Amino acid sequence: MPRGKKIIIETEIDDDLVDRFRSIDIEDIKRRRDKTEKGLSSSVANVFKVAQNLYRQKASEDELEGKHDLYSVRSAYEYLKGNGVYISFRAFGGRIERGTIPFVKVGRKRYIPRSVLEDITKTKGDFFTVKEAYEEYKKANPRINFRAFIGRIEKGSIPSVKFGTRRLVPRDAVDAMTHISSNYYSVSQAIKELHKEGIRIKRNAFERRLDRGRIPHVKIGGRRFIHDEVLKELVGKELNLKK
């Protein structure tokens, strides 16, 4: 009997985070974002008409903010900060200047509609910036550098989407990658662990077992990973065979 058939791995891994990673549909995210942006554009256009009427009526700033859900730049910044969106006031002002945050003008002053601020808050809750994603992932995988992380995004092994000029990474993707780094072994890492235990196996032989499904694994971003419980069982059974 071929040696590989002597070991049957019984551990079964049912991992919700891996399933969530696999279910990320970037095209669907783009479609939903296009729909959201059209809705925001229509909302801002309607608010603009209201704002012009209010200007002609000489409405006060308190009235604008209290009754019509329009926020001055400073109030908008405080609203975002209060909802967990941390950005410097200078950077916030820069985004308004560049038009990446829609606004309406009442006289000489800029105001941001509440719907725009709610969208920014929701986006922050669902996505990381590339830098934020890297910093979060690095906690679980300190060996990776920012350049390598960017490379994975460019190759598509880390899903990302562009909203306007900003590239964002879904939080579900980062959560799954962090989980995998903490609980799974890459093929190279698994072979090193086997060698540490005195189990000599060549990479080609190990990968043949993966190909034939003899070692349960998951495939993420084109790479194969083995859960630590699966590897523990494999090591134990290999050592028993040696005895």
Image (spheres, rainbow, N blue to C red):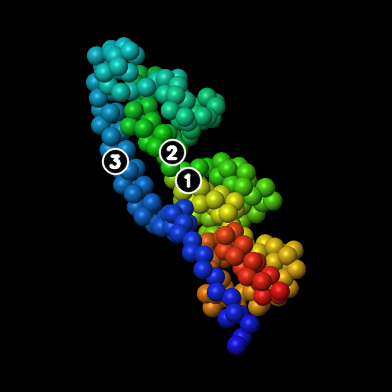
Crowding near the residue tagged with mark 2, few <14, some 14–19, many ≥20 C-alpha atoms within 10 Å: some
Q: Position of residue 10 (x, y in %)?
A: 51, 68
Q: Which dot marks residue 243?
A: none
The kind of residue tagged 1 is: Arg
Q: With 157 as the anchor, is 143 left or right in this view?
A: right
Give the residue pinned by disc 2: 125
Q: With 91 as the anchor, is 115 left or right in this view?
A: left
The quarter holding residue 112 reads top left
Q: Position of residue 175 (x, y in %)?
A: 51, 48
Q: With 16 as the anchor, is 61 left or right in this view?
A: left
Residue at (33%, 13%) from the top-left corner?
A: 62
Q: Position of residue 126 (x, y in %)?
A: 43, 42
Position of 229 relative to 98 (above/below) = below
Mark 3 / mark 1, whichever is N-terminal: 3
In the foreground, 157 or 181: 181
* SS type, badge 2: helix
Q: Is residue 162 visible?
A: no
Give the residue pinned by disc 3: 39
Quadrant for the N terminus in the image: bottom right
Give the residue pinned by disc 1: 171
The quarter holding residue 155 reads bottom right
The kind of residue tagged 3 is: Gly
Task: Determine contact: label 3, label 1, CB under 8 Å.
Answer: no
Q: CA distance from mark 2 to mark 1?
A: 8 Å
Quadrant for the C terminus in the image: bottom right
- Which residue appears farthest toward the front when viewing the image? 243
Position of 197 relative to 52 (above/below) = below
Residue at (38%, 30%) from the top-left corner?
A: 117
In the foreground, 41 or 122: 122
Q: With 123 as the anchor, is 236 left or right in this view?
A: right
Q: Position of residue 97 (x, y in %)?
A: 47, 30
The quarter holding residue 42 reads top left
